[in-house]
């Protein structure tokens, strides 16, 4: 039976991975924040060397919407950098065979051609409101690529599209677009409002992916994907916010 460590098992992605892998023939390893501080290198190295997982999924991180990114840029870049670096380095030191690391749709340039392709990464300026978070995710992906190139590991960088589903955050300070829309329309209905005001032009295209479908895709990647370059994971059904 394979042992899979899911770092960040209570978040949107992590909880979906737990739901999915709980039904598979694997031994799941999880650790709450109260037991393991992922920003502490020594603690992470001790944990992974002791548990000896066959695969590590880096589903942890500080995440949030536009408002949270704007108000807490230091926390977004520092915490995500530390967690990624600690998990990737500790996995290599412990001889972990597979590691799945996640990028984000926001790591693509602000003015990016559609559809977004891997070749578009780092070709132009990032969206200013989430630049610290995006730079942290790009750095984590570069770290994975560097370890693969230097040490011959077979670690994977996957870039999910806009995720939604059970376990999502509905706090308007931290949530992403689907959850924000659900909450705004729900509150408008309760208050018998005639309209809901949304930011932007409504013309921006997003590719939305249900979280449990993404969890299944992660299993497929761990089993079959063995390429050096990152891979986009999405529904390939873009739509505008309007």
Image (cartoon, rainbow, N blue to C red):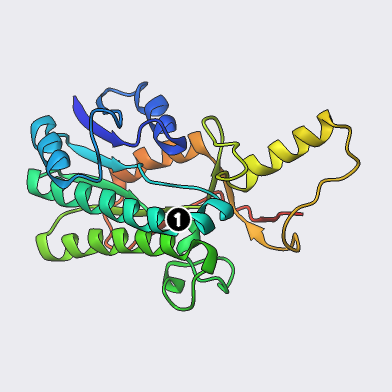
Position of residue 150 measured from the top left corner of the image (x, y, whole percent):
12, 65
Of residue 128 and residue 19, the one placed in the foreground of this image is 128
Q: Number of callouts in the render? A: 1
Question: Residue pushed farthest right?
Answer: 194
Position of residue 16 measured from the top left corner of the image (x, y, whole percent):
44, 31
Residue pictured at 28% horizontal, 22% vertical: 25
Residue pictured at 46% horizontal, 47% vertical: 63
Residue pictured at 54% horizontal, 30% vertical: 166
Of residue 21 and residue 103, the one placed in the foreground of this image is 103
The residue that label 1 is drawn on is 104
- Image position of 200 with respect to 36: above or below: below
Residue 190 horizontal side relative to residue 83, left or right: right
- Image position of 154 with respect to 222: above or below: below
Q: Residues within 10 Å of mark 1 (few under 14, many from 20)?
A: some
Residue 35 horizontal side relative to residue 46, left or right: right
SS at circle 1: loop
Position of residue 28 measured from the top left corner of the image (x, y, whole percent):
26, 26
Question: Residue pushed farthest bottom?
Answer: 124
Residue pictured at 59% horizontal, 38% vertical: 171
Query: Which quadrant is the N terminus positioned in?
Result: top left
Of residue 145 and residue 38, the one placed in the foreground of this image is 38
Query: Where is residue 58, by image quadrant?
Result: top left
Residue 153 horizontal side relative to residue 65, left or right: left
Query: Which quadrant is the C terminus positioned in?
Result: bottom right
Position of residue 71 measured from the top left corner of the image (x, y, whole percent):
52, 55
């Amino acid at each position: 039976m394979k042992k899979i460590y899911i770092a960040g098992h209570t978040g949107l992605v992590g909880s979906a991975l737990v739901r999915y892998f709980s039904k598979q023939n694997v031994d799941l390893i999880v650790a709450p924040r109260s037991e393991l501080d992922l920003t502490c290198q020594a603690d992470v190295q001790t944990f992974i060397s002791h548990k000896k997982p066959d695969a590590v999924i880096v589903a942890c991180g500080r995440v949030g919407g536009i408002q949270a990114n704007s108000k807490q840029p230091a926390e977004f870049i520092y915490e995500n950098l530390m967690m990624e670096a600690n998990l990737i380095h500790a996995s290599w030191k412990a001889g972990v065979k597979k590691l799945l690391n996640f990028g984000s749709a926001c790591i693509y340039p602000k003015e990016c051609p559609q559809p977004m392709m891997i070749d578009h990464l780092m070709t132009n300026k990032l969206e200013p409101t989430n630049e610290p978070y995006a730079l942290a995710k790009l750095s984590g992906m570069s770290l994975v690529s560097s370890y693969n190139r230097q040490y011959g590991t077979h670690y994977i960088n996957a870039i999910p599209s806009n995720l939604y589903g059970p376990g999502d955050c509905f706090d308007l300070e931290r949530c992403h677009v689907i959850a924000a829309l659900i909450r705004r329309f729900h509150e408008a209905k309760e208050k018998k409002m005639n309209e809901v005001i949304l930011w932007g032009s409504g013309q921006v295209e997003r590719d939305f992916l249900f979280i449990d479908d993404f969890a299944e895709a992660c299993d497929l990647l761990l089993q079959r994907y063995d390429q050096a370059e990152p891979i986009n994971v999405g529904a390939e059904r873009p739509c505008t916010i309007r």
